[in-house]
Image: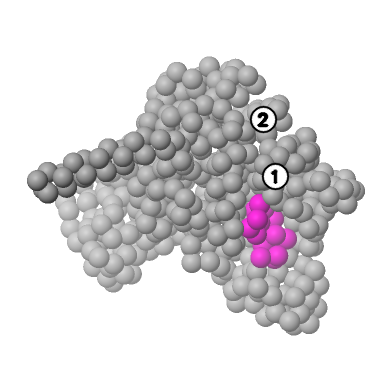
Amino acid sequence: MHGMKRTILAAVALLSLLYCVKQIPRGAVSLKIIILAGGGGTRLFPLSRTCFPKQFMKLGAEQSLLAQTITRFMPVAKVADMVIVTNQEYIHHVKAELAACGAMGAHILLEPVGRNTAPAIALAARYCIDELSAGEDEVMFVTPSDHIIRKNDLFIKSVRQAEEMARQENIVTFGIKPDKPEIGYGYIEADEEYGYGFRVKSFKEEPCQEVAEEYLAAGRYYWNSGMFAVTMGQIMREFSTHQPEIYQLASTNYTDALVQFESMPNISIDYAVAEKSDKVVTIPLLAYWNDIGSWDAIYDVLDKDQDGNAVKGDCIPIDCTNTLMLGRSRMIAGIGLEDLLVVETDDVIVVAKKGESQKVKDLVGELKQRGRKEADEHTTMYRPWGSYTILGEGPGYKMKKIVVNPGQRLSLQMHYHRSEHWIVTGGTAEVTLGEEVKLVHENESIFIPLSTKHRLENPGRIPLEIIEVQNGKYLEEDDIVRFDDVYGRV
């Protein structure tokens, strides 16, 4: 009798629990995080370039900016509910960062071409609906991948507030209370109080100095952080109202949206939706925020000595004040510098007055116009299998240091215009040369003749390092004919 009573009570308890679970709105237990990580980045040149933009840089921290972004959201979302939007060129960088921060379960969404933030967000929403079974009432929180945010407990509190307000059919943005007349940010003009923040009256473009000072004095303007929260259903309704072309291409299913992505207009989410919608509200972000969009911003976040100098690398400041000195490959000596920004890599040195670093993007534009490869490429280039660094080059020759990670292999390939000589300086190489496969050990070398199929592989447990000397009349990377490739590049 007592056993039957216990069974009945347990059944009642289970039914009560199931009833309570059914009453929880689906979105309350599932927040989708959309991380935009496809941007090339020009404002932190020469460290950030098209081949390795700032979201993958560490900037003095243990984690890259992308890894910091992913880790930041772990208290409010499962890794399986995170979607990283990027492109094919950066996929191996993204995978490496996911592994580094223990987030391999996150989803990677590849844009076929760059189309700005509005199409990227529409595609991400479609992916969440079709591939992750997200309901219309589920909230997506969209964020850039390259910002610095501190006091994460306060940030999480703001995310929860944004999630709550997004469920009320709002598009919720994060505004940053300005502490100076910044000309490098867009602004949000706040209207009457609403919920945890304000209704938005208007969005403003990056202002001139005089207008930025007026915004600061007025007290009702906020920097636009580029982060926002909205439900899946609401963002689709907004696209339907304000961007019917995007809505038409993204409203059917994810597969079709991906195929037609190239046909979408190249437009930001601010222009496409936020500036047109009457559903936008802003919450003043409680945490510290910096989009580190310039070398002036980098100077602001770095530790400084008693003279106001921020110094990283092999640098010697003498009688310098309020100066950034950042060295990577050689010593920098500064004497009597004041309010300057000095950034060095092994192929470029940039020197700028503080307050003028927004013009670095103009420098990159000038380099592109002149056809300079420095605009896009570092001397060290990262690949899915490792990296290579150009050590020197001249007419008819190029010398590289190649690092192959343990267990990785390059494609089976050949070259029509160059021969190669490989010298192993660390680890053991497994080399396919024609029909022969052989091991090449440290301090040994092998010659790769012109037009001969070959492959380099690291069978060991430590990085394989080789010096490669190329000889020929044409030495560019497009002189690679691939026959087999584990990374799908054939």
Q: How far apart are marks 1 and 2 (CA)?
A: 13 Å
Query: Residue sitting at 56 percent across and 68 percent down?
Result: 60
Q: Where is residue 416 in the image (x, y as percent from the top left)?
A: 36, 41
Whether 263 is drawn above or below 347: the answer is above
Q: Indicate left or right for 413 with 295 as reference.
A: left
| Applied colour scheme | one colour
* Image quadrant where one finds the C terminus: top left
Whether 317 is drawn above or below 5: the answer is below
Q: Position of residue 176 (x, y in %)?
A: 71, 51
Q: What element carries label 2?
A: loop
Whether 488 is drawn above or below 308: the answer is above
Q: Position of residue 432 (x, y in %)?
A: 22, 51
Q: Indicate left or right for 81 with 288 as reference.
A: left
The residue that label 2 is drawn on is: 279
Three-letter residue code for mark 2: Lys
Q: What element carries label 1?
A: strand
Whether 148 is drawn above or below 78: the answer is below
Question: 343 or 426: nearer the eye?
Answer: 343
Q: Residue 341: which numbered mark, if any?
A: none
Magenta extent: 285-301
Question: 477 or 384: nearer the eye?
Answer: 384
Query: Residue sitting at 12 percent across and 49 percent down?
Result: 2
Question: 441 or 232: nearer the eye?
Answer: 232
Label 1 packing within 10 angstroms: few (<14), some (14-19), many (20+): many
Q: Where is residue 100 in the image (x, y as percent from the top left)?
A: 39, 59
Label 1 vs 2, first from the N-terminus: 1
The residue that label 1 is drawn on is: 197
Query: Residue sitting at 12 percent across and 43 percent down?
Result: 4
